Amino acid sequence: MVRKRCQGVWTYAYMLVVALLIGVVAGAAPKKPVPVPFGKNYVPTWAFDHIKYFDGDSHIQLLLDKYTGTGFQSKGSYLFGHFSMRIKMVPGDSAGTVTAFYLASQNSEHDEIDFEFLGNRTGQPYILQTNVFTGGKGDREQRIYLWFDPTKAFHSYSVLWNLHQIVFFVDDIPIRVFKNSKDLGVRFPFTQPMKVYSSLWNADDWATRGGLEKTDWSKAPFVAAYKDFHIDGCQSSVNAKYCATRGKHWWDQKKYRDLDDYQWRRLRWVRRKFTIYNYCMDRKRFPVMPRECKRDRDA
């Protein structure tokens, strides 16, 4: 009887732990992206002949040569949502090149949410730079190395944006959070709809070792590959001040107002193991720590 009772206690304890773990791991994870063809959500923006389409435009390639790069943008503008793509970066010697995936509004005091992948010499790792602009002001760069080679296979890069936070994800692992710190006097993007953009372009004046490494055009064309062009956002007029259906979408629900415990642990892992620059820690540029850094747990 004692043995059965102990077994029952252990079974209950095990089930409780499992239930808690499931809740911790899955509680605030974004919904699984839905793969869709390029043409459903996006259109080319420039150098149309430098975009190649495959498998009914479910997979595309952007090409960069010494004449031009290329890019595309979303058909709609959005206030909040979840935006995701799977990208395979330029392989080999990619120094000087930048592959960008970002959201941006359309006016001078623009808001912007940036992924920028900075190429490097063969054998050296890519650098992923993120930034957030609010009211035309950026200067919030963070840089990390990735824990995998982004040129070998497709990986998912996504942004979750709501009234409470912006979260950058790589393969569902949060690599950065930017909380709404409006109460601290920090502007937060919530009034300007944004389009989603991506581009492949030459930036050898700054992208690799501060511009010391130049693009080797003998390696051109440089090719970045894309698929799974997921957008789940509140589409809005560019003149809208808010989303008419705000509060009704999954990303507005309470569990998406903050990272859960598991996600914070994963974010700390990224910061500890892979971060190579964080503006919050740069006392030359910011003798006084920016006010949002403590709330974002970057300090």
Image (cartoon, helix red, strand yellow):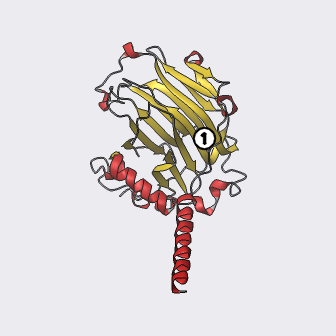
Q: Which residue is mark 1?
A: 194
Figure label count:
1
Question: What percent of the width, then of the height, locates residue 51?
Answer: 57, 20
Residue located at (37% from left, 43% from top) = 144
Residue located at (69% from left, 43% from top) = 235
Question: What percent of the width, then of the height, locates residue 10?
Answer: 51, 76
Give above or below for 81 relative to 261: above
Q: Specify the quadrant of the image occupied by residue 290.
A: bottom left
Secondary structure type for disc 1: loop
Q: Is residue 292 in view?
A: no
State the residue lying farthest toward the bottom: 1
Give above or below for 158 relative to 46: below
User: Which residue occupies the foreground of this view, 185 or 217?
Assistant: 217
Left or right relative to 132: residue 44: right
Left or right relative to 261: residue 238: right
Give above or below for 108 relative to 63: below
Which quarter of the rendered picture does the N terminus lie within?
bottom right
Q: Is residue 175 in view?
A: yes
Q: Residues within 10 Å of mark 1 (few under 14, many from 20)?
A: many
Give above or below for 85 relative to 30: above
User: Which residue occupies the foreground of this view, 33 or 96?
Assistant: 33
Q: Amino acid under label 1? A: Met
Left or right relative to 94: residue 263: right
Q: Specify the quadrant of the image occupied by residue 247.
A: bottom right
Which quarter of the rendered picture does the C terminus lie within?
bottom left
User: Which residue occupies the foreground of this view, 182 or 297?
Assistant: 297
Question: What percent of the width, then of the height, locates residue 69?
Answer: 49, 21
Question: What percent of the width, then of the height, locates residue 262?
Answer: 48, 60
